Image (cartoon, rainbow, N blue to C red):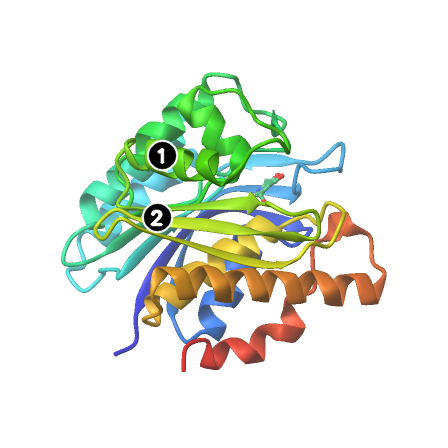
Amino acid sequence: MQKRALAIHDISCFGRCSLTIALPILSAAGIETTVLPTSILSTHTGGFTGYTFRDLTADLRPIKDHWLTEPGITFHAIYSGYLGSFEQLDIVTEYVDAFQKDGCLFFCDPVMADNGVLYKGFTPDFPKGMASLCAKADLILPNLTEATLMLGEAYPGDSYDQAYIEGLLHRLASLGPKMVVLTGVSFEAGKLGSACLDTSTGEIGYAFTDRIHGHFHGTGDIYGSTLVAAMLKGASLPRAIQIAGQFTYESIQRTLRDGKDFRFGVNFEEGLASLAKIVE
Ligand code: PXL
C-alpha cells in the first residue's frame, strides 16, 4: 500500500535544501507527500547574504485545524527539518500530538548547526527546545554538532573514538526517541558515515562511504529524506543508513563532476530514478 508522509520544512527558493529536496526524493520513492512549508526564503542561509525571509507561522495552526476536519487526512510518517523559532517547535509538537497515531512515525531532523556552530538566526537556547521536540520522535538524526548541543556537551571536533560515539548514541536515546542516527561520523581519515541505535533491540550499526572533502550544502536534507524514504519502503534501520549515505555520496560526486557553486546544493536530481526501486 502506498504510504503518505507529511514533510515540515522551509522552502528555500534557490539553493536546493529542505522542502525542495524532501518532496522530490520522497515522491521519487513512491511516497505520497504532503508539504507544510514553515517559511519562504529567497535562498538558504548558508553562504548567501541579503536573503528574504517570510515567516509562515501564522498559517500553520489553521492548516492543521482544517486537515483535522477531514478524517481521511492521516499520515504514515511526519518528517520535520529546519524550524525557525520556538513557536514553530511548539506547533510541530501539536502536529505530532494530532497525527502521531496508528503507527505514524515521527522523524525529527534537528537542523540547526554544523561544524561546532549554530546556523545564522538561532539563539544559544534553541537546542534545548529542539531536544524537547526530539523527545517525541520515533527517530532523530542529528549531526555531531547538533547532538552535543542538545545534550549540553562539548563538541569533540575530530577527536573521538567508537566508545564515545556509542555513548553519545545512548545519551541521545535517553532524550526519548526510539531510534537514533548520528551523521558525520568518521573513525579513519578517508571514510565518513553515520551510526545508528535502535533502542528496541539495542542494536548499533554503522555505514561509511569514501570521504569527499569540502562542504556541500543540503546534504543533510538529502540524507534525511532518503533515510525516511527507505524506512517507509520497509528497509531496516542499518540498511536505511547505508542507502541514505550512498545516495548522498553519489549526489556529491555528480556535483563535483559538474563543477557548480557548492552553495547551490548537490545534484540529486540525476539520481532520482534510482529511488523508484529504493528497496528491492
Ligand atoms: O539544509 C538545512 C537548511 C534548511 N533551510 C534553511 C537553511 C539550511 C541550512 O543552512 O539555511 C533556510
Name the side, left or right, on which 136 lies relative to 278. Answer: left
Q: Quadrant of ligand 1?
A: top right
User: Element under label 2?
Assistant: strand
**Badge 1: how crowded within 10 Å, few (<14), some, or many (20+)?**
many
* Label total for image: 2
Q: Is mark 2 within 8 Å of ligand 1?
A: no
Residue 172: mark in rendering: 1
Q: Residue 160's image quarter?
A: top right
Name the side, left or right, on which 101 lies relative to 280. Answer: left
Is residue 112 visible in the rendered image? The answer is no
Residue 185: mark in rendering: none
Q: Residue 90's image quarter?
A: top left
C-alpha gap between disc 2 and disc 1: 10 Å
Q: Is residue 254 above or below residue 38?
A: below
Name the spot of residue 28 as percent of width and height, x first. Answer: 49, 74
Q: Residue 130's image quarter?
A: top left
**Badge 2: how crowded within 10 Å, few (<14), some, or many (20+)?**
many
Residue at 37% across / 24% down in the picture? 129
Name the spot of residue 251 as percent of width and height, x first. Answer: 66, 64
Counting residues from the start of the chain, the first of labels 2 and 1 encountered is 1
Q: Amino acid at mark 2?
A: Leu
Are circles 2 and 1 on residues that touch, CB within 8 Å?
Answer: yes
Q: Residue furthest right?
A: 259
Q: Is residue 242 above or below residue 143?
A: below
Name the spot of residue 217 as percent of width and height, x first. Answer: 68, 48
Name the side, left or right, on which 264 lies relative to 16. Answer: right
What residue would you read off at disc 2? 197
Residue at 46% across / 49% down in the picture? 195
